């Protein structure tokens, strides 16, 4: 474990200890009501067809990288198991910054995101046929995770276990959950599964909210996110398909 990783873990540990006093602690909900928690996300569900079309545009013009190529820290859940299959991601937004290729290939989606407050990270999550994701949990309680099903196989649709609850994705259907609970993806389908993932800063009272924003958009950006964005820029240049 290098020094950078030690610092990142320490920052998140401090944040988690503060946020746990407001999020319900061990009794915090696993799945949350999207409309009640983030009503502004209704525009995303309503724009399903435009978002799906722009994913297809990405897939046509770009060789989407495996998740661990974008962020090495997720190698254990992205690349270590089923190495012949890929969990791929296309980054649309991270901590206030939008990659140039996202603006080029997904202009409507990026414009929609600009109108939604408290967004932290956004990406297309693509599972190749049969690719599952082993049990894991998110490291930081400062955000909640939203899914919109973009492409979901009708035969043997993949499912996600969230603590002790099972959810099967459906196209144009939204899901909001706390990914710091243990979860895994079971995928036995023979087609790709695509989900739009949006991480949003967790609703908190004023003071812990300011602390969370400082941790997520300043401290973590300084020690981790800037490197991810730099690596994404390189990948975007090298993987773009020529016509």
Image (tube, grey):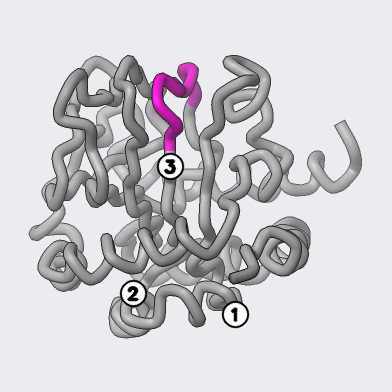
Q: Which residues lie in the magenta part? A: 127-136
Q: CA distance from mark 3 to mark 2?
A: 17 Å
Q: Which residue is mark 2?
A: 109
Q: Is residue 182 above or below residue 142?
A: above
Q: Secondary structure at mark 1?
A: helix
Is residue 41 shown to the viewer in this render?
no
Q: Is residue 49 left or right of residue 127?
A: left
Q: Which residue is mark 1?
A: 100
Q: Which residue is mark 3?
A: 126
> Which residue is drawn at the image coordinates 44% and 61% (left, top)?
122
Q: Is residue 243 above or below residue 159?
A: below
Q: Secondary structure at mark 3?
A: strand
Q: CA distance from mark 2 to mark 1?
A: 13 Å
Q: Earlier in the sequence, mark 2 or mark 1?
A: 1
Give the class, few, some or many, for how many residues have Cα within 10 Å of label 3's Cα (few <14, many ≥20): many
- Residue 167 x/y as whole percent: 18, 27
Q: Is residue 133 left or right of residue 42?
A: right
Task: Say whether residue 131 is magenta.
Answer: yes
Q: Is residue 16 above or below residue 104?
A: above
Q: Is residue 94 left or right of residue 22?
A: right
Identify which residue, 71 or 213, lies in the foreground: 71
Quarter of the figure with residue 242: bottom right
Quadrant assignment for the C terminus: bottom right
Identify which residue, 23 or 187, lies in the foreground: 187
> Which residue is drawn at the image coordinates 50% and 23% (left, top)?
136
The image shows a total of numbered marks equal to: 3
Residues at circles 3 and 1 in contact by the CB criterion of under 8 Å:
no
Q: Earlier in the sequence, mark 3 or mark 2?
A: 2
């Amino acid at each position: 474990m290098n020094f950078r990783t030690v610092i990142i873990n320490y920052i998140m540990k401090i944040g988690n200890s503060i946020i746990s006093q407001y999020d319900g602690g061990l009794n915090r909900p696993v799945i949350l009501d999207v409309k009640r928690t983030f009503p502004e996300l209704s525009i995303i569900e309503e724009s399903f067809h435009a978002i799906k079309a722009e994913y297809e545009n990405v897939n046509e013009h770009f060789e989407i990288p495996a998740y661990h190529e974008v962020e090495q820290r997720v190698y254990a859940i992205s690349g270590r198991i089923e190495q012949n299959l890929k969990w791929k991601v296309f980054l649309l937004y991270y901590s206030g910054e939008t990659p140039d290729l996202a603006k080029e290939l997904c202009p409507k989606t990026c414009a929609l995101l600009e109108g939604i407050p408290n967004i932290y990270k956004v990406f297309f999550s693509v599972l190749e046929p049969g690719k599952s994701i082993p049990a894991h949990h998110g490291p930081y309680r400062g955000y909640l995770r939203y899914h919109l099903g973009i492409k979901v196989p009708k035969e043997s649709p993949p499912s996600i276990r969230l603590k002790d609850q099972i959810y099967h994705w459906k196209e144009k259907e939204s899901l909001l959950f706390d990914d710091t609970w243990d979860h895994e993806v079971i995928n036995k389908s023979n087609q790709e599964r695509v989900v739009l993932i949006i991480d949003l800063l967790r609703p908190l009272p004023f003071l812990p909210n300011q602390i969370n924003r400082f941790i997520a958009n300043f401290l973590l950006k300084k020690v981790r996110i800037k490197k991810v964005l730099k690596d994404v820029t390189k990948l975007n240049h090298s993987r773009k398909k020529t016509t």
